[in-house]
Amino acid sequence: MLQTIAFDADDTLWENEQFYRLTEQEFRALLSDHADGDHLSERLLAAEKRNLKTYGFGIKGFVLSMIETAIEITDGQVPTETIAKILAIGRDLLGHPIELLEGAGDVLDTLAGSYSLMLITKGDLFDQERKIAQSGLAEKFAAIDIVPDKNASVYRRIFARRGTEPDSTAMVGNSLKSDIVPVLELGAWGIFVPHALTWSLEHVEAPVDHQRFRQIENLKVLPELLSRLS
């Protein structure tokens, strides 16, 4: 019997990646005199990947990677005015209002009477706390965990600390790499809710043959799926 339903936050409960894409477009425009847009995006992605172990996930690491890319692309000649503009668009990204995905609040309300709800999200602590507070969803969760990364070891520690058994837990999220594959390894259910925009570094092959893997079109059908699994 399922007892606990854990949720990812970014692009599962509210929009996130689309704002990074818009910021990247501004970055490309700033440096359009130095390189074409696609090349800039490739160099930025390489910098983000390279810097994950140092800066972690989140907006601050993204902004630092933009600055690093600007320095590389211009051979160290990037104007201070351009650096200032990169910092400004980063601040705008940090202050962007939360946009809940359709049905997010209603689905949580529906499930709250039957399951213990958890929120497990990764990224910069300050930014994730801001988004959680602005979302208005915090009070719907029995537990909230903000972690620098998500893998099987991290989930194992969270479940142990919260007294949650993996075999009675389902994790719901839009990232196969971060939300689904690690919990399947522990014996939990993984419920994949694809988002139209998912960061390329989160892409892995879907474990379609795993008996505890499920994929749904959107959050609104989640309660019906859980009722069948329970």
Image: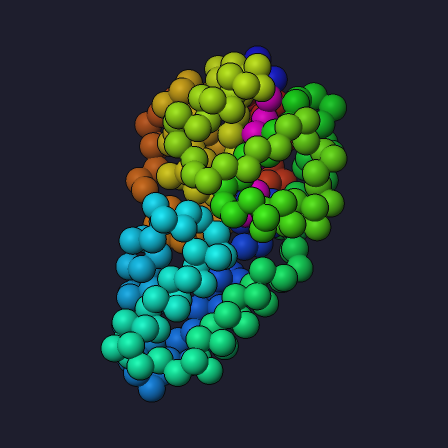
Looking at the picture, the colour scheme in use is rainbow
Residue at image coords 59%, 48%: 126
Given residues 120 and 105, the one toward you in this image is 120
Name the image quarter holding the N terminus.
Answer: top right
- How many discs appear? 0
The verdict on residue 131 being magenta is: no
> Residue reaching furthest bottom?
33
Residue at image coords 65%, 50%: 130
Whether residue 115 is visible: yes
The verdict on residue 5 being magenta is: yes
- Above-or-below relation of 166 to 209: above
Residue 39 pos. (x, y %) = 27, 72
Whether residue 173 is visible: no
Given residues 183 and 45, the one toward you in this image is 45
Which picture quadrant has residue 73? Answer: bottom left
Residue at image coords 38%, 62%: 65
Left or right side of 166 for 137:
right
Q: State which region is magenta.
A: 4-10
Which picture quadrant has residue 46? Answer: bottom left
Left or right side of 76 for 81:
right
Residue 21 pos. (x, y %) = 46, 64
Residue 147 pos. (x, y %) = 50, 37
Residue at image coords 42%, 47%: 56
- Above-or-below relation of 131 to 33: above
Residue 5 pos. (x, y %) = 59, 26
